[in-house]
Amino acid sequence: MADDYVIEMLHITKEFPGIKANDDITLQLRRGEIHALLGENGAGKSTLMSVLFGLYQAEQGEIKKNGQTVKINDPNDANRLGIGMVHQHFKLVECFTVLDNIILGVEDTKNGFLQYDEARKKVMALSEKYGLKVDPDALVSDISVGMQQRVEILKMLYRDNEILIFDEPTAVLTPQEIDELMEIMRGFKKEGKSILFITHKLSEIMAVADRCTVLRKGCYEGTVDVASTTKEELSKLMVGRDVEFTVKKRAVQTGETILSVRDMVVGSRVHENNAVRGVSFDVKGGEIVCIAGIEGNGQTELVYGITGLEPVKEGSITLRGMDITHASVRQRNISGMSHIPEDRHKHGLILDYTLEQNLVLQRYFEQQFQEHGVINSGEVRKYANSLINSFDVRSGQGPVTVTRSMSGGNQQKAIIAREIDRQPQLLVAVQPTRGLDVGAIEYIHKRLVEERDAGRAVLLVSLELEEVMSLSDRILVMYEGELVGQFDNTVSTEELGLYMAGAKRMEVKA
Amino acid sequence: MKKDNQMLVGIISSVISIAVGLIFGFILLLILNPAKAGLGMSTMLSTAFSNMDQFGKMLYQAAPLMMCGLSVGFAFKTGLFNIGASGQYTIGAFFALVGAIGLKLPWWACLILSCVGGAIWGIFPGLFKALFNVNEVITSIMFNWIGMFLVNLLLANMPFMLSAYYGVGTTDRTAALSDANPSAIIPRGGLDRIFGNSSWINISIFIAVAVAIIMWFVLFKTIFGYELMACGFNKEASRYAGINANRNIVLSMIIAGALSGLGGGIYYLAGTIQYVLEKSILGMGFDGIPVALLANSHPVGTIFSALFISYIKVGGSAMQPNFSSETINIIISVIIYLAAFALLTKLIIAKFLQSAGAKNEKKEVKA
């Protein structure tokens, strides 16, 4: 029984220009188990799964199903073998209904007309059986992210897939939705389905997986039984060294006020009401001030207002005694403001530019990098190389790598290198660790604390309570565009939660 | 893959695509007129090289094509689709001719005027886009028509511009430069002697190539180009970086307009062609779009794509007696259309090389 493998991927090697994404990797999936695939960003998890799903062809190695060698040339082959996948970014047609999306590609037709009745019955039966609540007639564009994921899962079930791949399924879910998903996965296991679960969240592996295969930098690190291992051991396998889960900080030593915001009002792009409604606070040198809150309570607009991406309607912003309320982004940058943006693809990087071009994104015009308007490419290269070395930014071709081809963690590292190296007076960091693995998170936290210890003002916006608690010296809670609570970092998460949910509030004055 | 290798693959794929286009064009000729197909094809391919006069004509036509291609490509790099190259070209030609015939200016001053004219016509779509976020495609299409009819209207009311004023009895075209102001004709620089007294050739091809190289330098080597392409790739991120995106949109359209305008200037200041009051938009600006696409908007690539399209066009016009002009246009379009598949061919070749490379590696492992 122990060796009843439903899928075996043996000695898989897959190369991309300049990088070996998978180097001799073996993964064996038993029938009816939940098998976690763990690794840092860029470790090769997604590549390996894409090979199994037929999106990439491996240069070497073989894939066996029930002991028979199989060839998977495209997702249709994978589907025929009973392999289904929920991608990290869902592959749904937004303007189709849930039912349309589920049957897309395997529609029953009669004389060229779609036959919905049978399909609807089957979908509803599956939905009932596994507790996957969906509204079959709702448009995908109208339903929540959690329900979209259930649609993706139903798509696999509708095709009678036996092997289910989940690519980082919890990244987009709320804590309650994560619990539900875990329950659903356990249900599949009971049914005898086999699950491959890609993640870098250790607690989820400990909660639901039977075994775990660990990859590091494209190489196979081992497969362990989850029951007989610990979080620490897993993270050591994944990162290659011991990981500290708590950030070491010395006591806060605040200096003079760097940023002060008074009665700031910022409009919203989505609705008529103002997103930020009269917010006042100060950030001093040498402290990390954290804005906590549930997503969509005006944190994004607050940051846009401070960094100049969105005009401020009322109130004032002062940076080191200088009024910057209506200053341009460029003026704010030059005056000593750095910004690690929430969305690294939308704001942080020009993905079609090379790494070195991105590393001088706010500095290309400085004397050092130009001569009479002509870029001094030698200096740019030298500067990029020094940043790449000191911040350990990994990429296929070094400074000339197109940033689009880099892993998310290294893209984020590049942004952080750029923003910190400008030696800002104020560092605004929004969700700086979103979607990153423990190794990268640890690194980024350490860097932020170093900035604070160097006497800089750090304004951190985060949705992760754990991050808020471990990093901040002062916590401000934002609810519906207003600051409703101010705490030091000894407050309990339960108390913080009440303020975040709007159940309690206090007067906050700068 | 190394960079040189990529360049090589790029060139090979362009050549293959062009070859496929020619084969398809030939098949079409076989279907349309089997008896003359062979002759037609060889006329198309050999005319430009058959004598120095035709070769000169190819270079002469390539210059304005190159300018329009540079104009469209430059705007592309900034994230704008300048479909208004035709209008800018027309206004540029008008400014140059007013300078030449009306103001009796020397040729270089007329060329500067043509840049100014094109730039003015480029400003409007740029401003509308930057200030009111009006799609530049719509504005520039409208400005193509406005430009053409405005030029017709103005010329009709400027009798001193027309050839009738110089005793040649037509009022539907501008005066020949040889009558009105010979100093406005772009100098031949001795090229006419090399090109067997070709009436077409002048130094405009060198002007166009020089401009292409300058554009390459501006885009890839200056901080101005860095800003422009940043806006083109990701407007939000360039805003985040403190780049004034709106200013760059306007500047980019001004430059694109000036490039097209210069194209109009060099075409009509050659002295061989007079501006005819048109009822439809001049095609040269639209031909700039395939020129830019074929070159993947790269300024240096534009030199070669403009030469190629000019070569096919010169060959095409020599097919006239045996084939109708419509047929010739179809053949030319097919060839250009398939040549634009160069990017696809490139991917196929890269894939082929990759799998071949992997096989070689395997062999080495076995050995």
Image: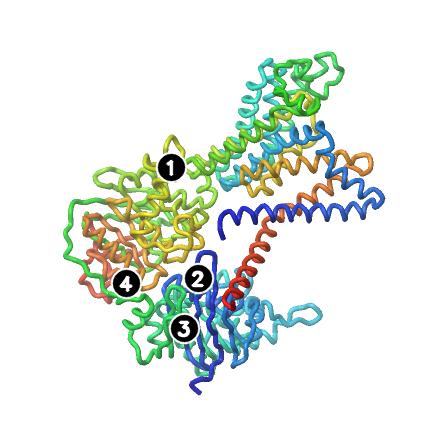
Check disc 2: other Cα within 10 Å, few if <14, some if 14-19, many if 20+: some
Q: Three-letter amino acid code at disc 2? A: Lys
Disc 4 is placed on an element classified as: helix
Q: Which residue is mark 2?
A: A20
Name the image quarter holding residue B44.
Answer: top right
Q: CA distance from mark 3 to mark 4?
A: 21 Å
Which circle marks residue B256 in the picture? Answer: none
Left or right: residue A456 versus residue A373 is left
Please provide percent x and percent y for residue A18.
Answer: 44, 56
Q: Along the line of sight, which residue is nearer the eye, B354 or B286? A: B354
Q: Nearer the viewer, mark 4 or mark 1?
A: 1
Q: Three-letter amino acid code at disc 4? A: Leu
Q: Which residue is mark 1?
A: A376
Please provide percent x and percent y for residue A408.
Answer: 39, 57
Q: Nearer the viewer, mark 4 or mark 2?
A: 2
The verdict on a common chain for dots 4 and 1 is yes
Residue drawn 24% across the image and 50% down it: A458
